[in-house]
Image: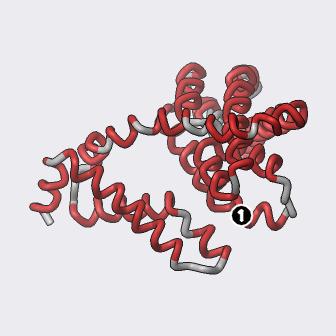
């Protein structure tokens, strides 16, 4: 295992290749499952993360070196996020048809997320630094980390909470929509985008292009609302 670890740590392209292979394996695994609940639990993002973590632990590779080697994939996240605007452009007529409902829904989703964190922090007597670190959990990482740093939070905790929120939203999207009988594409997209940011919007795109378009718009609205409201709520506790 030591030689394998040295090989992974020493070749930058190996970590990228293993990460991509882990995701492809996760997609294949989900495709083999037919039950809707099992498919939701076997989200490729979650399963790929488990594969990568297990591989790093079993081989004894350096996690820091592995993360540094996968930076080319991280760099691609920004243009990939920008590409989410394409479905919105194709379905701009939906925005023109329901502008108030879409904006109000996304803004309400962001405010509810902030209030849930505030109530949770009060109930569990969280310290102020942990409270403000969790406030931006439902917006995209680039904005959330900046908000957390500005409020004096722990940036690494914020990044983890954002990732977990997105993964949970990705997994629960299908069952939650069925349970709540949420069939309207616009409503589903706004809900996923405002609650689970980019990762939720990826799931929305799998549901349909309209859902993905509304999810990408909800990400922007939620980010703006959180940037404005989080500093105000930060002083409540």
Is residue 88 visible in the rendered image? The answer is: yes
Q: Is residue 136 left or right of residue 66?
A: right
Q: Residue 2, image x and y in percent?
A: 12, 62
Q: Is residue 75 above or below residue 24?
A: above
Residue 181 at what x, y percent from top left? 87, 63
| Mark 1 element type | helix
Per the image, the residue denoted by label 1 is 174
Colour pattern of the rendering: secondary structure
Q: Specify whether residue 125 is in view.
A: no
| Residue sitting at x 85%, y 31% | 96
Which of 153/17 is in front?
Answer: 17
Image quarter where the N terminus lies is bottom left
- How many marks on residues? 1
Residue 78 lies, with reference to residue 18, above or below; the image says above
* Location of residue 76 with respect to 46 vertically, above or below: above
Residue 133 sits in quarter: top right
Q: Quadrant of the C terminus?
A: top right
Task: Please say if 44 is above or below 67.
Answer: below
Which residue occupies the extreme left position in the image? 3
Q: Residue at x 72, y 32 (%)?
A: 222
């Amino acid at each position: 295992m030591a030689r394998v670890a040295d090989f992974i740590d020493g070749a930058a392209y190996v970590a990228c290749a293993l990460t991509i292979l882990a995701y492809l394996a996760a997609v294949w695994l989900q495709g083999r499952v037919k039950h809707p609940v099992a498919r939701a639990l076997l989200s490729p993002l979650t399963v790929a993360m488990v594969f990568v973590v297990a591989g790093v632990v079993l081989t004894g590779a350096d996690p820091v070196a592995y993360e540094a080697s996968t930076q080319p994939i991280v760099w691609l996240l920004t243009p990939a996020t920008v590409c989410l605007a394409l479905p919105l452009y194709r379905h701009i007529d939906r925005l023109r048809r329901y502008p108030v409902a879409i904006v109000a829904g996304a803004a309400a989703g962001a405010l509810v997320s902030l209030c849930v964190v505030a109530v949770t922090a009060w109930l569990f007597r969280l310290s102020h630094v942990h409270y403000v670190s969790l406030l931006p959990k439902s917006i995209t990482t680039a904005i959330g980390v900046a908000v957390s740093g500005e409020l004096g939070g722990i940036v690494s905790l914020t990044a983890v909470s954002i990732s977990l929120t997105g993964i949970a939203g990705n997994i629960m999207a299908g069952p939650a929509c069925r349970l709540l009988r949420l069939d309207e594409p616009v409503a589903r997209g706004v809900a996923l985008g405002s609650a689970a940011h980019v990762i939720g919007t990826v799931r929305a795109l799998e549901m349909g292009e309209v859902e993905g378009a509304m999810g990408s718009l909800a990400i922007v609205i939620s980010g703006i609302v959180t940037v404005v409201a989080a500093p105000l709520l930060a002083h409540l506790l």
